[in-house]
Image (cartoon, rainbow, N blue to C red):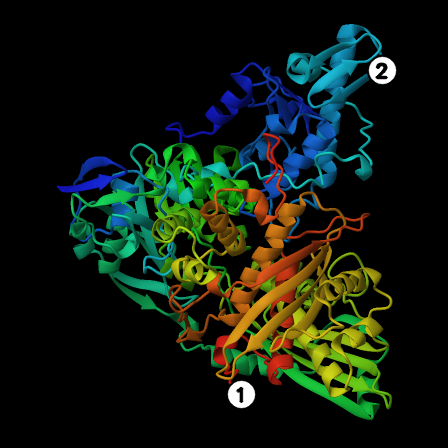
Amino acid sequence: MTTLNVNGKVLSVDVEPETPLLWVLREQIGLTGTKYGCGVAQCGACTVLIDGVPTRTCLRPVSTVKADEKIVTIEGLSPQGSHPLQKAWIALDVPQCGFCQSGMIMAAAALLASKPNPTDAEIDAAMTNICRCGTYNRVRAAIKVAAQGGDAKRAGLSIQHTDGSTT
Amino acid sequence: MSAKFSRRRFLGTSAAAAGGLVVGFHVPFASTAAAQQGVATPEINAWVVVKPDDTVVIRIARSEMGQGSLTGLAQLVAEELDCSWAKVTTEYPTPGENFARNRVWGNFSTGGSRGIRDSQAYVRKGGAAARMMLVQAAADGWKVPPSDCTASESVISHKSSGRSTSYGKVAAKAAKLTPPTDVPLKDPKDWKIVGKRLARLDTVDKVTGVQVYGMDLKFPGMLNAAIKDCPVFGGTVKSVDAATALKRKGVKKVVRVGDSAVAVVADTWWHAKTALDALTIEWDEGPNAKASSESFAQALKTGLDAKNAVVGNSVGDALATIAAAPRKIEAVYSYPHQNHATMEVMNATARWTPSRCEVWTPTQNGEAALAATSEAAELPLAKCEVYKQLLGGGFGRRGATDWIRQAVAIAKEMPGTPVKLIWSREEDMTHGRYHPVTQCKLTAALDEQNNVTALHMRISGQSILASVAPDSIKEGKDPVVFQGLNPPGPEASIGYLFPNLLIDHAMRNPHVPPGFWRGVNLNQNTIYLECFIDEVANATGQDPLALRRKLMTSNPKNLAVLNAVTERVGWDKPAPRGVYRGLAQTMGFGSYVAACAEVSVSDSGELKVHRIVAATDSGYAVNPQQIEAQVEGSFAYGLSAALYGECTVKDGRIEQQNFNTYQVLRMNEMPAVETIVMPSGGFWGGVGEPTIAVAAPAVLNAIFAATGKRIRDLPLKNHSLKKA
């Protein structure tokens, strides 16, 4: 049995040690918010935080993750999507198909944790995830909104939400 | 996802079980009797369900794959319904229900940027008819004429008596009324929901990990499958040694799928995938085992001067004019195979029994998916069902059904057990439905004053329709080949007027299966024409904008988007130091688009696309902020293709296996995009695709301005932009 700390819970899974963490999260633990995109750590759809470090889990054998290392997936990032990045993502209507967005948000969360007010160059360096729909500019804008206090109006998109607010 | 093998639970909680009623109208192809069958509510309506708490459920027949038409279609219905937008939810009817109800929801196919433009008329009527019936029901209760009542924000009011009621309160009565036959629609100037920058209805679950995609489905007792199809298209399985794989943990079965593929079924997908990799498969690679991109290019080259070609557009006598011209300009361009590379790989979950087959899959064409399920299951349509899942990207790939047939074939080997087939990225990359390859020779005739007196475009290459719908090829002509080059008309017409014009096609079909790839043939045709116009401008010493304007006098809509772009970018003023501009315009999928790219190229040849200004006239703009998202996304997709997109063939098989060898644009290369949404009214155009086509030529023309290098074949990664 392998012991993992996932989203604050200690879990035991019966799985071969070489199994990538991605598939343990998805198939043994049932957390499918973390996505399979390429299996070769190119696209970043499988990104989670391990002790705060953004990690592409599709190539990471579960045996190399220690029991006391804290794994955070998109499901555990915040209660009810309340992380500043998730709020900014909603305010700017960032996702299109949405498939890559879990990985995008986890990569961005790691970035803001280490660089609370990142420059464009720092965003470029940290955000190497692939999005085929092409949400990149709204991703960048949402990171800046989250970094700069959450005022989504400054992004200038003028989106009307069902609660009557405009961002 | 529910443990029940049905979405009835979903429908049930949304309408029937909640005691609400369904109101609606008749469409010409609807059969009332059929419409009543199999539905738990006393339904007279297809599009609108109103629950007692005033929640409005709008049925969406087209697929959502990120393009936002789920929200846009709901806006169109809600506008005419005059309901409160805050109370709107949506659901998909199933293809099986559409079949059972004589296609009451019309076409489910979601491609060609048709989601909004082809369904707007009947979905708006659905909303309007429902509103009329709700108002009628309220008026009947008050014993007043409906014409004395008004509806707004889900509330019906009778002004003179001061009475009012809500949609939810009268929905049950409204559902029993005879649907109106005369259903007038609002004047667009009165729209309150359509045309607004509304937030999408499907965002929240996508940022919390809650959204379930096809790949994420779980059912009790479900098994997982991984598959390997013959790496050479047209090849077959000669033999499989499954002994080792069958001994591996979790493996249940090794299955031959058709004559060309092998699948492993296991408890988890990871077990299935690793066991598949452990199989020893001997292939008969068939007649295409030696084919290569080089052999395709040679074959296509023969088409550039071939005698036999099919004419797509002809004005005057281009060939004679060219033959007699004092000056000619000629250039040959080409466009490679490309994979759609949706972020979510192909997948489907199927459950087969001798009496029923059900499939859960992300599909752009629910009805084709149902037909494929029926065929593969060897069961009649009425005994099959497809549950559409949100697509993790489509771009045309998911209009096909190849993976659905595979999933059903595998499930058939495991009766009663749901089996989820997920392709590996490598399988997805090497078994796509690729952007067709073509070449194009362009020849322009010039008179003594440098006026273009004739243009001949000879396209040689692959036909999508010849592969996916061969019956639609009449007298050798695939009309889709001429996208963006058609005679004047509402669809994909050429934006320039030449006194003599010939556009013809010599079909050459490599064995690699082509498919509709976001933007389709508008992509390469716009590169060919827009770069060549630039070449003519350069060769004749004319400004690229001035030449275009001269040729576009009879096409004011094309000209308007081009003018909007060049005004915004300040074409008549110099660009910032070191920055160079390129233009492109086209018309396709019913819309007019133009773009100006601003690029710089360093001495070492490094390209930077700084900014793109783009304009779209789609006639009407249902949700401008989502149109902006589509335009931005189109540049990401189009520039990915321009910079990197190329699937090469060696020994009959696709060489690129994954994103490490099939790179796409990432955030550091994404330019700033300024989108001008300029709906001129009177027509309905699509927005998901047309802008893709201007991405590459605008950048290529800017690269020429920056370097003097004219790139005529893509992708750019194969070229050095280094200063000579």
Q: Identify the amino acid type marked 1.
A: Lys
- Quadrant where the N terminus of chain B is found in the figure: top left
Question: Relative to residue A53, is residue B165 depicted above or below?
Answer: above
Could you tell whether A1 is left or right of B157 in the image?
Answer: left
Same chain assignment for discs 1 and 2:
yes
For disc 2, the chain is: B
Q: To which residue does mark 2 refer?
A: B148
Q: Identify the amino acid type marked 2.
A: Asp
Query: Residue B678 at what x, y percent from top left?
Result: 75, 53
Could you tell whether A58 is left or right of B667 in the image?
Answer: left
Question: Relative to residue B238, is residue A86 depicted above or below?
Answer: above
The residue drawn where x is 85% and y is 88% is B447
Query: Residue B352 at what x, y percent from top left?
Result: 39, 37
Q: In the rendered picture of this protein, how many numbered marks are placed on residues?
A: 2
Q: Specify few, some or many for label 2: CA neighbours under 10 Å numbering under 14, 14-19, or 20 or more.
A: few
Q: Which mark is residue B569?
A: none
Q: Specify few, some or many for label 1: CA neighbours under 10 Å numbering under 14, 14-19, or 20 or more.
A: few
Judge by depth and name the residue closer to the eye, B388 or B141.
Answer: B141
Q: Quadrant of residue B154?
A: top right
Query: Residue B621 at what x, y percent from top left?
Result: 71, 46
Element carrying mark 1: loop
For disc 1, the chain is: B
Element carrying mark 2: helix
**Residue B533: in sight, yes or no?**
yes
**Residue B266: in sight, yes or no?**
no
Q: Quadrant of residue B290?
A: bottom left
Judge by depth and name the residue closer to the eye, B283 or A59.
Answer: A59
Judge by depth and name the residue closer to the eye, B36 or A99.
Answer: A99
Q: Nearer the viewer, mark 1 or mark 2?
A: 1
- Marked residue nearer the N-terminal end (1 or 2): 2
Q: To which residue does mark 1 refer?
A: B723
The residue drawn where x is 87% and y is 66% is B554
